[in-house]
Amino acid sequence: MKEINRFSKQITQDGSQPAAQAMLHAIGLKDKDLEKAFVGIGSTGFEGNPCNMHLNDLAVHVKRGVEHAQLNGLIFNTIGISDGISMGTSGMRYSLPSRDLIADSMESVVTGMSYDGMVAIVGCDKNMPGALMAMLRVNRPSILVYGGTIAPGYYNGQKLDVVSAFEAWGQKVSGAIDDATFKEIVQHACPGPGACGGMYTANTMASAIEAMGMTLPYNSSNPANSADKVVECEAAGTQMFELLQKDIKPRDIVTKKALENAFRLITLLGGSTNAVLHLLAIARTADISFSLADMQHISDTTPFIADLKPSGQYVMEDLHLAGGIPAVMRTMLDEGLLHGDEFSVTGRTIAENLAEIAPLDFEKQKVVFPLTQPIKATGHIQILYGNLAEEGAVAKITGKEGLSFSGPARVFNSEEEANDGIENGMVQKGEVIVIRYVGPKGGPGMPEMLKPTSAIMGAGLGKEVALITDGRFSGGSHGFVVGHVTPEAQVGGTIALVQNGDIIHINAETNSIQVQLSPEDIQARRATWNAPALKASNGTLYKYARTVSAASKGCTTDEF
C-alpha cells in the first residue's frame, strides 16, 4: 500500500519527536493510531447564524467516516462572519477579509500540525472560497463539504427567505406593508439551520465548487436538515482514504477547465456576482490564468435559464427536488456545455460521476428552463469597461430591469449615507445612485450593498433607478446594479470624481459604463482630488487595506 502518512510521520514516527508523541497520546491516540494518516477536519461552525450553527455536528459525522476508513480524524475550528447579520452595519467590512483569514488559519493548522489531508465543513459565503484557497495552498488530499441550504420560510402562503426580510424593510419604509406584516415576515423568513436559500453567494459557491469536482455529488443541493447531508458527511470522511492512497490533490482537480465548468454552471443558474471575486482569487491561488475576459466569454456564450431567487421565485431546495446540481451538470454535459474529462474527489471524472444521473426533466420541473427557452440569451454577469471602470466592473443584469440605463448621478460617500438618502426620499426616479469609498481599501473590506438594493426593490424602484459602487453586492441583490468598479475611489478611480447631476451611461449590450465627462474635465477634477485617510488605522481592517489587491484581481491578500 502507498504511504499515506507522508506528513504526519515526521511527528509520529520520528524517535526524536517524543514530546509530540506524548501529546498525541494525551488526546487518546494509541501506538497503532500513530501509524495512521492524520486528516484535519476544519469546521467554520459557530452558534451565531443559521448557516454555521450545525456545522460542528456535521464535523462529527465526517470524523466518523474518517475513522471508519482507519484514519485519524482531528477536528479544528476557524472563524466565520455572517453576511446576513452584519449586512448594513460596520461589521460587514469584516466579511470579505474573513475569506482570507479562513484560508490563512486552515493553511496554518494543516501545515503546522503535519496533517496529511483535510476535510472542510463550511456554511456561509466566504467559508467556501476561503477553505478551497487553503486546500490549494497546502495541496494535500482534500474534500469540501457544504453544510447545505436552509428550508424556505412561509407566511400567508408566500415562500420566504432572508432577502424577503431585507426587502420587507423597503416595503415598510415605502408604506407598502404595515409593521405587523413586517414583523411576521422577519419572524418566519429563516426557519432553521442552513445557508440562505436562493441562488445567493453561499449556494452559488457551493454549486461552483461541486462543478469543479472538489465535493461529492449532490453536496451543494443536499438540504442542511436532510438525512442525505449526514450520509454525505460520513462518505466524505471515508473517501479521504482513496484520495490519500492515490495522492489526488486539489491542484490535480482545480484546473482552468474546472473553473470554466464552475463559471458556466453559475451563469446558467444566475449566481452571485461575488463568484467573480472568489473565482479570480481561487485561480490566482492555484496559479491558473483565469481572468475577467474568460468570464465574459463564458457569459457571452451561455444562457441564463434558472428561475431562482433573488430575481426568480424558486430556492435551492426546489432545485434539489428537481434533481439537484448533478441533474443540471448532466444536462450541461449532454448539451456540450461541460468539460466532462475533468477529475474529481470521487477518483473519477465528472462525466463518470454523471453517467447514471438523469438530466433535468423539463416536463416535470419548472425551476430551470430549457436552453431553447432562456430567461436571457446570454449570461446575467457582465463585465463592463469605460472611463468609470478602466479595469472593469461587474454588472448583474437579468434583463428584467432592462439592458441599459442613463441618468444623472446621485452620489453618496458611504453606504450609511445611501441608506439614509433612500429612506428619506432623496433618490428620484431616473437617477443613478453612486455609492463610493466602499471598495477593498476604501471600506475597508468591500462591504455588500444588499441593504440599499433591497430598499430600492422594496420601494418599487427596481426598474426606475440604477446603482453603481466600488463595493460588492450580495447574491441576494437584484435590480440594475453594477459593482466592483475598479479602480476604486480610495485609489483615485474616476468614480471618486463623479458629482451630483453628472450623466452616467450603463449599457449591458455594449458592456460599457461611462460618465459624460471629457478627458479634460476628468483630468481637472483629478488635479484637485486628494485621497481620504483610510478608515482603519490598526487591526485587521488596516492590515487588509494595506495588503489587499484590486477587485479585478480577486481581492487577494498574499500578493505584494
Image (tube, helix red, strand yellow):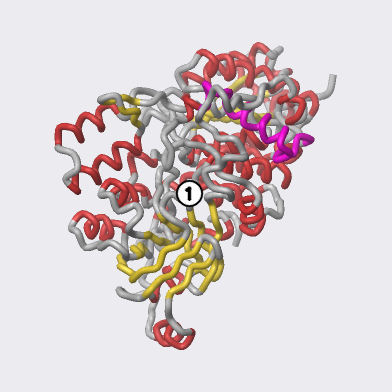
* x 42%, y 56%: residue: 481
Q: Is the residue 373 above or below the residue 364 in the image? A: below
* Rendering coords of residue 100 (x, y %): 52, 47
Q: Which quarter of the image is occupied by the N terminus?
A: top right
**Kind of residue sitting beneath label 1:** Thr
Is 182 on the left-hand or right-hand side of 242? left
- Give the prevailing secondary structure in the magenta stretch: helix
Give coordinates of residue 198: x percent, y percent. Answer: 44, 35
In the displayed structure, 227 sits above or below 372; it is: above
Residue 458 x, y percent position in the rendering: 28, 46
Q: Position of residue 235 (x, y in %)?
A: 63, 17
Write the start and end of the magenta stretch as one range.
319-341
210 sits left or right of 272 in the view: right
Placement of the C terminus among the 4 image quadrants:
bottom right
Residue under the point 58% across and 48% down = 377
Residue 557, placed above or below residue 86? below
| Mark 1 lies on residue | 398
